[in-house]
Amino acid sequence: MNLIKMTAVAALILAVPTFASNSIIPVSTETKDMAVSLRDKAMKDDSAYEILKSLTTEVGARHPGTPGEKAGIEWGIKKLKALGFDKVYTEDVEMNGWVRGVETAEILIPSYQKMTITALGRSKSTPEGGLEASIVHFASYADLEKAADGSLKGKIAFISNRMERFQDGAGYGPANIARSKGHELAAQKGAEALLIRSIGTDDHRNPHTGATNVAMGYTMVPAVALSNPDADQLVRLIEYGHSPKIRLNIQTKDLGPIVTKNVIGEITGREFPDEVVVIGGHLDSWDLGTGAVDDGAGVAIAMATATLIKNNTKQAPRRTIRVILWGAEELGLIGARAYAKAREADGTIAKHVIGSESDFGAGPVYGLQSSDNVSPNALHVVDTMAALMGELGVTRRSGDTSGGPDMMPLAALGVPALNLMQDGTDYFDLHHTPDDTFDKVNPEHMRQNVAAWIVFTYIAAEWPGSFK
């Protein structure tokens, strides 16, 4: 090597800042300025809203194993390529398919009334033509636990617990055990079927579907969700001293082994292309609506975030931004588990720097949480993100997080996570219902979401330190 080349190399080495492994690396002024510029551009940009409009209009519902799901996968590949992502690819995910068919319910005694129901995920069918039986009312899952085993033979167990409304969705977990595990408990007590009040906060006559804890095959007994007004009607009849007899008819089908896909797009990092910042949402949806808030909004927010960074920076961030459109989330995080398992097997899990998923609708972001495994030497970076999101109405929040449902398998393997907390006050009015449609989404809120996500994503990909 000649002297001129040696001098040039030395100058280059001196120009690159070096830090001790345990030092606190500041977020540069240039990085913060660019994050602010991107944030402000996002607040004037409707690309996420337009992406969501396309997905919910040109594709619609995307339930695994249906033509809609296949169309959604094709849409995701085509859209990511059209948006200019550097790399677009898919990964196969094996699962067991299930679809619903006939769904009817009627009160036969004491007065004839039709009810609005939907089968829960992987519910088995009633006998062809339906099942007629009296209901036995339980105010909660815990009350059903107290019933003697075998005591409900020939009856239908009815759990009427109502989900409570909270901004952060805290009422979902306590109520959801009736949906996820109630079928097993009902079968243990001898019931012919399980009927639950929908896990939702609305008073519309729309039932809420959702997953049970069955990965393959069928539930132990037919498992059905009843709209909240119809659940109220049954409770009132019981309060009047009646013992309602109902007819349920649900017919479902196990599709057997099928293959879905995770759809992935990347903006390649300029210095550390093998290190990735993960953002995304789940591409699948339930079949009752068009999956606008769950989770088309998250898909669109992630895609728009990465695209705006690519199109409005002179050079790519240091690290790769990986947008993952996870498959088959609704039936049990199936795509997310497959993705994490594959990265654990090939040893690239350590290259996942930090991640987060948008999967709580399209309400505005109001808080920023970090997982407990974020390094103390990186907490100032999260604080900086929150400060730059302050003009959007976002504040720094305490509490651990996994970064979203599809981030849970990655978080379990040690990947740090952030939670961009959305206002979910009304989310469970729409969640898993026919009302989950594009018209419920506020374009101003979508802009605010992308503005918050762009601050997190750009700084995480550009800051040279470790979050671990």
Image (cartoon, helix red, strand yellow):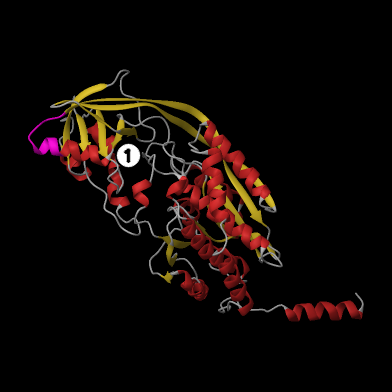
- Left or right: residue 48 compared with residue 14: left
Residue 341: x percent and y percent?
54, 47
Choose top left, top right, bottom left or bottom right for residue 117: top left
Instruction: Judge whether residue 203 can be spotted in this image.
Output: yes
Residue 183: x percent and y percent?
29, 35
Tell me the residue at 45%/62% (across/down).
419
Tell me the residue at 12%/36% (across/down).
238
Residue 58: x percent and y percent?
56, 39
Q: Quadrant of the N terminus?
A: bottom right
Residue 116: x percent and y percent?
29, 33
Magenta stretch?
A: 236-244
Residue underneath mark 1: 206
Q: Is residue 160 above or below residue 172?
A: above
- Element assignment for label 1: loop
Q: Which amino acid does the dot numbered 1 rest on?
A: Asn
Q: How many marks?
A: 1
Q: Is residue 241 inside the magenta stretch?
A: yes
Q: Is residue 465 inside the magenta stretch?
A: no
Seen as rendered, the residue at the extreme left is 241
Tell me the residue at 26%/33% (across/down).
194
- Left or right: residue 350 compared with residue 438: right
- Left or right: residue 348 compared with residue 427: right
